[in-house]
Image: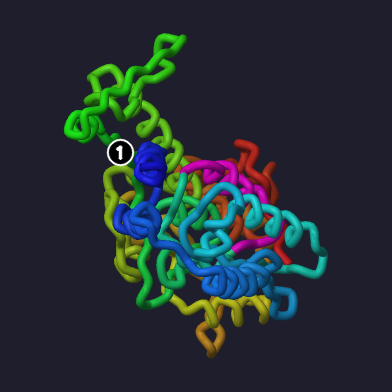
Amino acid sequence: MKYDRIIAYALSTPWAIRPEALGAILDVLQIRAAGGRYTDEELVERLEAARAQNGERAGGRTRGSVAVVPLYGPIFPKANLFTEVSGATSLSTFAATLRRLDADPQIAHIVLDVDSPGGSVELVPETADLIRRLKTPTTAVANAEAASAAYWIASQADELVVTPSGSVGSIGVWTAHEDWSVHEANRGVRTTLISAGKYKVEGHPFAPLDDEARAAIQADVDAYYDMFVNAVASGRGVSAQDVSGGFGEGRMVLARDAVRQGMADRVATLEEVVADAARGTRRPRNLVGWRGEPDPEATPPTEAAPTGEVRIEVNTPAAAENTEAEIPAERLRLLGRGKVRELFGLRADDSTVPALAGGETRKEEQ
């Protein structure tokens, strides 16, 4: 019974995760509820294996001046025994790693290696905001899955790449309510709640959910969903309506379709992204209009090197002035900070780019 109620509590928490992934997590609790448990030897073995993996995760790994930081498995706000045993991600540890790398003068580029079905919404908005404020250029790679909360976080990087077999999306928030009243009645049990505060026990599992409680829970889900949609819109340089009315509408989207819809910038493997960053080369972000069409107002990319890499050239002041004259401020706002910096050249700062006048921090190019 104890674990059954833990499961009910877990379901009632707002989640930004693929439902089938949460189901797998709850299966572990169901096994526990049925009396299953690891032996001491099995627990030690799993802990040692997970800690070995998490040890690398906590510090990331570097290739020259490029730091690769994994974002793996279900996402939780803080580390606990479950995150250690299951290989899940603690956002507190993840954020601490990003802050340390951002302050390291030897790190010129951060690559997020993302393979996660999403997780709890707690600390996700704060982590997404942290990535937007990093001074170090950051690329997120869906390798192979950036779903729900993981996509929320990855969408805030300067560039979002999907491995050829990967997918992104699952934009949405959900929760559940379990009604235990019939189960208790069958057992001859009736739970009486004694409380103070009008809504203190609202949504409890010992009676069917009433309309007022359902509306309150829906309001919370809607609030988190709005945070999710607005963050993705800001990170991808599109409108909130484009995100809520497209971008998979809760479904996962495969790599090439994701690029066509503006959910990602290009298709490449993690190894290719790290190699590009290690060489100090950057590829241009995908230019998309409101519905994923090529942007007719965008300036063409710089000439590609024989390897297919693109080196961003510094524009002259005159070129920057011409670009500003040709592209409306609204279009610049929608393109997002990474593309605006490319269009205006690396010398541009917030004062010369109207799209960045809202207080976004410009990342220094290495």
Crowding at dot 1, Cα within 10 Å, few <14 / some 14-19 / many 20+, comes out as few
Q: Quadrant of residue 256?
A: bottom left
Does residue 318 appear anywhere in the picture? yes
Residue located beneath label 1 in the image: 176
219 lies above or below 16? above
Q: Nearer the viewer, residue 204 or 302?
A: 204
106 lies above or below 24? below
Q: Residue at x 53, y 57 (%)?
A: 82
Q: Quadrant of the N terminus?
A: top left
Q: Residue at x 69, y 42 (%)?
A: 351
| Part of the protein shown in magenta | 121-138
- Report x, y in % for residue 101: 74, 62
| Residue that sits furthest to the bottom in the current view | 306
Q: Residue at x 50, y 57 (%)?
A: 154
**The disc labelled 1 sits on which kind of residue?**
Ala
- Report x, y in % for residue 25: 39, 57
